[in-house]
Amino acid sequence: MCAITAGQRGRRVLVLDCANKPGKKILMSGGGRCNFTNLYVEPENFLSDNPHFCKSALSRYTQWDFIELVRKHHIAYHEKTLGQLFCDNSSKDILEMLLHEAEQAGVTLKTRCAITKCEVSEEHNGSYRLQTNQGEIITDSLVVASGGLSVPTLGGSDFGYRLAEQFGHQLVPLRPALVPFTFSDGFKLLSEKLSGVSVPARITVSKQEFLENILFTHRGLSGPAVLQISSYWREGQSVQVDLLPAIACLDYLIKQKAEQPKALLRTVLSQLLPRKLVLELEALWWPLQAEKPLAELSGQLLEDIAEKLNSWDLKPSGTEGYRTAEVTLGGVDTRDVSSKTMESQKQPGLYFVGEVLDVTGHLGGFNFQWAWASGYAAGQVV
Ligand SMILES: Cc1cc2nc3c(=O)[nH]c(=O)nc-3n(C[C@H](O)[C@H](O)[C@H](O)COP(=O)(O)OP(=O)(O)OC[C@H]3O[C@@H](n4cnc5c(N)ncnc54)[C@H](O)[C@@H]3O)c2cc1C
């Protein structure tokens, strides 16, 4: 996006990518359909140590600007849920659109080009001198758009962070985000047995909560609600899972006991939750009363079960890490970067855009929107 914008202004632009082909994350994103933006982009959808930083760029290149570009290229898309826009056909449509725009703007793209060294060259009036496996490059402006550590097989690398540090930038600590939780306690066995079961749930950590689906996996918990909350979770914390977010469980169970005293608790709960899940919860929470009718279950037991259904306390042992994390939380501290131009305030002519910066979006197309918006901001001035 930065290259396109700068190229359209008549700048001579060279994009260097060490990968064998461009846009690998675009191709893999959104399950192959690229969740390219969101209808409801707000600064509140982004995490950063400096929460105001993202506002300027997001307001100057909005989701509507990107949607207009997608429409101009006649790419069919749809809203999946919660404002998330996906291609009808394939992520390839988005990549081809960007490559076409870049070509039109006169951008040159070099793949398989690894940068081995970057320095300011006094003999070239303070320009940047890059050593690469395809020769030396001298440039006045250098835009770092090298992304984060997530998914090394798709190009995740620490290059941008090292370069930032080389020029005196601080890093906000890095951690994998939008990533599934793993467990080492008894829950691991349970999640293995329930692998593939998905239910809508409210998941909470500290004061942050998300209401979307959770998915049991053979390693632990995944699904959109879990990926979202992982950006707020820290080692050692518990998460609370409300399996019946629309229902006050105790009231419901008391009512069922009065109306269907002969029914079993599992029968009543199976009307609200997948039976497979109810059977596992039964084995965990009321194994001795499994065959007793509701009439024989004490008020205290119903209270305990209702409490767990509405606020199940789970303690992840960790996350699946960068191998599967969709993004890297933290990054180049934005306090030393201009929010208007993305230029370093420590090193003239050096710019940072996209995920390498300490701006991390929620799940739902926000990370791409940040990449488009910050790239556009730099492209206008670079
Ligand atoms: C599996 C997966 C699915 C995702 N799905 C979505 C989604 O649907 N919607 C959404 O909004 N976000 C999604 N994301 C997040 C999104 O892909 C990223 O936030 C976004 O791509 C960041 O853009 P970027 O340009 O900053 O970095 P990247 O897209 O990561 O691009 C960085 C580029 O820099 C290159 N590079 C790295 N190091 C060097 C080096 N030393 N020399 C030269 N080149 C280098 C890489 O090869 C790569 O091409 C997903 C991420 C993953 C991993």
Image (cartoon, rainbow, N blue to C red):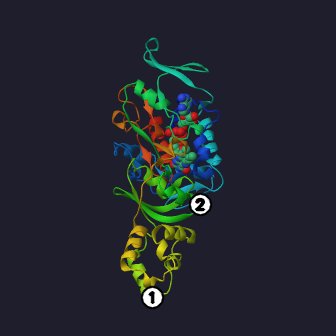
Q: Are marks 1 and 2 in contact (CB under 8 Å)?
A: no
Distance between the Cα atoms at labels 1 and 2? Answer: 33 Å
Q: Can you tell me which quadrant of the image ligand 1 is in?
A: top right
Amino acid of disc 2? Gly
The picture quadrant where one finds residue 14 is top right
Residue 318 higher or lower than 148, as above or below: below
- All told, the count of numbered labels is 2
- Residue located at (35% from left, 29% from top): 345
Disc 1 residue type (three-letter): Glu
**Residue 231, numbered label:** none
* Secondary-structure class at tag 1: helix
State the residue position of label 1.
Answer: 259
Where does the image place residue 156, in percent across and percent down from the top left? 54, 37
Residue 185 drawn at (x, y percent): 47, 54
Q: Is residue 318 above or below residue 268?
A: above
Q: Is 118 displayed left or right of 50 in the figure? A: right
Quickly name the residue at label 2: 196
Element class at badge 2: loop
**Closest to the observer: 149 or 197?**
197
Left/right placement of residue 244 relative to residue 337 reads right
Give the residue drawn at x 47%, y 40%: 355
Q: Residues within 10 Å of mark 2 (few under 14, many from 20)?
A: few
> Is ligand 1 closer than 8 angstroms to the Cβ of mark 2?
no
Point out residue 189 in the picture as x, y percentages from the top left corner: 54, 57
Nearest to N terminus: mark 1 or mark 2 = 2
- In this rendering, is residue 99 above or below 71? above
Return the x and y of residue 83 as percentages of the image width and height: 50, 59
Q: Is residue 378 above or below residue 278?
A: above
Give neighbour class at mark 1: few <14, some 14-19, many 20+ (Cα, 10 Å).
few
Q: Is residue 382 visible?
A: no
